[in-house]
Image (cartoon, rainbow, N blue to C red):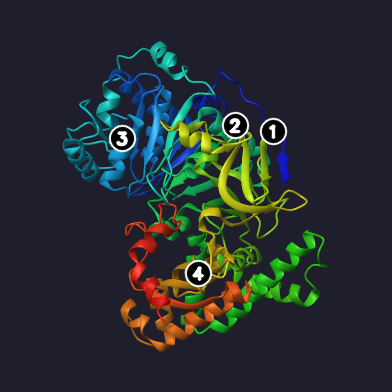
Amino acid sequence: MREASTELLVEADPDSNVTDLLLERCHKDPFGNLYAHKTANGWLNVSAARFLADVTALAKGLIAGGLNPGDPVAVLSRSSFEWTLVDFAIWMAGGVTVPIYETSSASQIEWILADSGARRIFVEDTAKAELVHALVEQSAVLGEDPVTIIRMEHDGDAPNLTSVSAVGVGIMDSELERQRSAANLASVASIVYTSGTTGKPKGCEITHGNFVLVARNVIPFLPELLMQEGARTLMFLPLAHVLARAVQVVCLTAGITLGHSAGASGLMADLGSFKPTFLLAVPRIFEKVYAGASHKAAMGGKSALFTAASAAAVQYSTAVDLAARGEGPGPGWLLGLKHSTFNKLLYPKVRELFGGDVGYTVSGASPLSLRDNHFFHGAGVPVLEGYGLTETTAPCTVNTPSMSRIGTVGIPLPGTTIRVAQDGEVLVKGIGVFKGYHNNDEATRAAFVDGFFRTGDLGELDADGFLTITGRKKDLLVTAGGKNVAPAPLEEKLREHPLVGQAVVVGDGRPFVAALIGLDPEGLADWCAENKLGVLSPEEAASDDRVKAAVQSAVDEANKLVSAAESIKKFAFITAELSVESGHLTPSLKLKRAAVLSDFSAAVEKLYQK
């Protein structure tokens, strides 16, 4: 059993809560820009004083409407400035925020409202209001208590942000302060439901202490990102995800200007206009940027140049990383010359894709492939990979600019201990670990051992405390021959190919390992254009020998990572796109393995037919 710890850097007043961070920020720099609100005319800055005034007005409106300290309030919306405003207003009024992914089904929304006890819900727009109204009318589990639906808009006759704020004018400041200060570090700030890769989502009780201590400690832990004058970041991850919420609180505490992007579809344009200094992303974004850059080069007749530049970036980053570990001499003069040349010709164009001002990026939610990690490091967009779960308020380990090892997820955050059990399971104790599962004492008891949270992930700690995630306990495949196979590394390598959108490795109880391959629509179109094949539909591509040969080459590359017994022997195409909407990915783009295996069981069976 191996352990690694990082000492707590900053304490917090036990009687404080998240709203004290806002009051502190406003007192320190009332006219500093906390948020950038996207409008039709560009980005509109919102100062700390303006934000506090809006939060206060909305909080008073909630109190006037009967909200008591500790009452849960749900939020159903994509990420936006209004989401952030509502979140802090709920806390200011003494309430508990219950986020719901905007992609959630009616049954999921009903379950979260019932389980959390929330009888107030903020919704993005009229369409979401009608959805919630319909399910409330038909629900047999919500009981007789009415559900108040508030639109996160400022117009119309139905309850909305403006009308709720207006009814709070009679609430005294003393009453607001009584409710605001009712919560302390031990109080529940948010019930965050797991994105549900298996079964019904469980409500994780995240405390004010979790948010406050993570924010106060991660800032001095990552000063290169979070303590720079003029620091800006763009939020496009769903705020229903605890990682986005944690980063939101960090930015407020540090006085970093936070902009909200509508989502991945408009991200590249928003990066260009907002120009963040650092960026939080998920691996799929890095994969898309790499594939897009490769395709653009190919269509411009510069495919060979991009291939050479990509190889140089990976080789240069690898040499630097090995030298930092004391395992190599670093880049030689020839590699240094090649890297310097490409740093003038091509790498600036890669940096421009992130807005041009990004110093560092942070990747989380799922593993980033080694190829992509080294490429972006070598191209001057360093990726700091981290690790965490909903139950740890997201980050519990992260690479830092001064302590980084590519391929690992970094060292423990301050005030955090990581332990690897005898069976390889990663255990966590520390400032971010949640209070427990809402209304589920049995699950809470099962989730802890010796005071450590059982993550369900498998990992290794090196001698310097860097954690490497090697797989997930429940995802381990055991072939009929008794060979244990971790599917994640194979799937990550397969996704590096531009044709591959998703890969699902199978073989549990089977005679050999196989894979289901989901083609990436954009990658397929780009690949066809580059190879002058015309337009192929996913169905046509699945039976095209040239596509099969290209994907087989990706399989061959992935198989180089493992032994012969762990290698993928056969693959089959999934012509339907695996997405959040299809129910096969979580909102944080993690694979719902059980859902894929259930829906495509016939394809799996066909792989093993003699």
- The residue that label 4 is drawn on is 495
- The residue that label 2 is drawn on is 213
Q: Which one is earlier in the sequence, the residue at label 4 or at label 1? A: 1
Label 1 crowd (10 A; few <14 / some 14-19 / many >=20): some
Which disc number belongs to residue 306?
none
In the orientation shown, which residue stands out farthest toward the front?
481
Instruction: Identify the residue at image location x=62%, y=25%.
Output: 12
Q: In terms of depth relative to the viewer, which is nearer, 480 or 595?
A: 480
Calculate the distance from the C-alpha at mark 4 to the C-alpha at mark 3. Answer: 36 Å
Q: Which one is earlier in the sequence, the residue at label 4 or at label 2? A: 2
Picture coordinates of residue 481 (x, y %)?
Answer: 56, 70
Judge from the rendering whether residue 407 lies leftward or rightward of residue 16; answer left or right: right
Q: Are marks 4 and 1 in contact (CB under 8 Å)?
A: no
Look at the image and tell me in which quarter the C terminus lies.
bottom left
- The residue that label 1 is drawn on is 8
Q: Which one is earlier in the sequence, the residue at label 3 or at label 1? A: 1
Q: Amino acid at mark 1?
A: Leu
Judge whether 379 appears above or below 148 on screen.
below
Q: In terms of depth relative to the viewer, which is nearer, 18 or 572?
A: 572
Q: Which one is earlier in the sequence, the residue at label 2 or at label 3? A: 3
Q: Secondary structure at mark 4?
A: loop
- The residue that label 3 is drawn on is 113
Q: Secondary structure at mark 1?
A: loop
Q: Nearer the viewer, mark 3 or mark 1?
A: 3
Q: Quadrant of residue 221?
A: top right
Q: Which one is earlier in the sequence, the residue at label 4 or at label 3? A: 3
Label 2 crowd (10 A; few <14 / some 14-19 / many >=20): many
Q: Quadrant of residue 560?
A: bottom right
Q: Are marks 4 and 3 in contact (CB under 8 Å)?
A: no
